[in-house]
Image: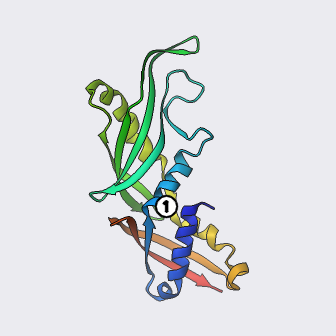
Amino acid sequence: MTIFSRVVAGSLLALACGALQSGAVELKVGRDVLERTLKQQLFGSATGRYYLKGSPQTPCSVYAEDPQLHFADGRIVVLLKTHAWLGTAVRGMCLGIALSPTAEVSVAPDGEGESIGFRDARVEHISDQRELNFVLTPFLSHKIPSGMKVNAADLLRNALAGSTATSGYKVTLDQLKIRSMQIENDALVVEADGSLSVK
C-alpha cells in the first residue's frame, strides 16, 4: 500500500463516524504526500527516470527525473530535470544534440467520479532557447498529467479490506464521488460524497 493510500484511508476512516449520516467528507492531502505519490507512480523505476519519448534501449530519447513539487496560484507545479538526445539513431548512437534543461510544468487538480487526476497542463518554463522549448513542450505538457491518476475509491476499498482484523468491525466503502478539489496553503483539499457500511 502506498503512502498516499494510507493517508487517504486513515483520514476517511477517522471521518467515517461523522460522515455516515451526512455522506460528505473533506480530505486534506499534503504536498509531500503528492510528491511521493508522483515519484512512486511515474518515477518508480530502478533509475528514477520517466521516459517522455523512447526508452532506456533507444539512443534518441527524452526523459525526466528528480521531480520537486510545490503549490502556486492554485496549481500544482512540478520542477523536473530533463535530458534529451534529439536526432537520428545510427548504429546504436544518437546523432544530434544533447540537452539537459530544468523544466517547470504546472497542472490543475481535477476530480471525476472516484478519481483524482489533473487537467489544464502548462509548461511554465523550460529554457531561454525558443527552439528547445518548441521541441520539448509537447512531451512535457501531455505526458506528465496523463500518466498520473489515482482511483481514490479503489485505494480506500483495499485499505479497508483488513479493517475487521484491526478494529473488530468490517468497514466497507459503498460509493465515493469527488465533488471538488482545491489547493489551500500546503494541502490539496478534496471534498467528496461517500457512503460507508459498518458490520
Q: Position of residue 198 (x, y in %)?
A: 62, 85
Q: Residue furthest right?
A: 165
Residue depicted at x 37% and y 58%: 109
Quadrant for residue 108, please give it.
bottom left
Q: Is residue 18 above or below residue 65?
A: below
Question: Which quadrant of the rendered structure holds the C terminus?
Answer: bottom right
Residue depicted at x 56% and y 30%: 55
71 relative to 24 in the view: left or right: left
Query: Label 1, on which residue?
Result: 33
Q: Position of residue 29 (x, y in %)?
A: 45, 66
Q: Position of residue 54 (x, y in %)?
A: 52, 28
What amino acid is at disc 1?
A: Val
Q: Position of residue 47 (x, y in %)?
A: 59, 38
Identify which residue, 196 or 62, lies in the foreground.
62
92 relative to 70 in the view: left or right: right
Q: Secondary structure at mark 1?
A: helix
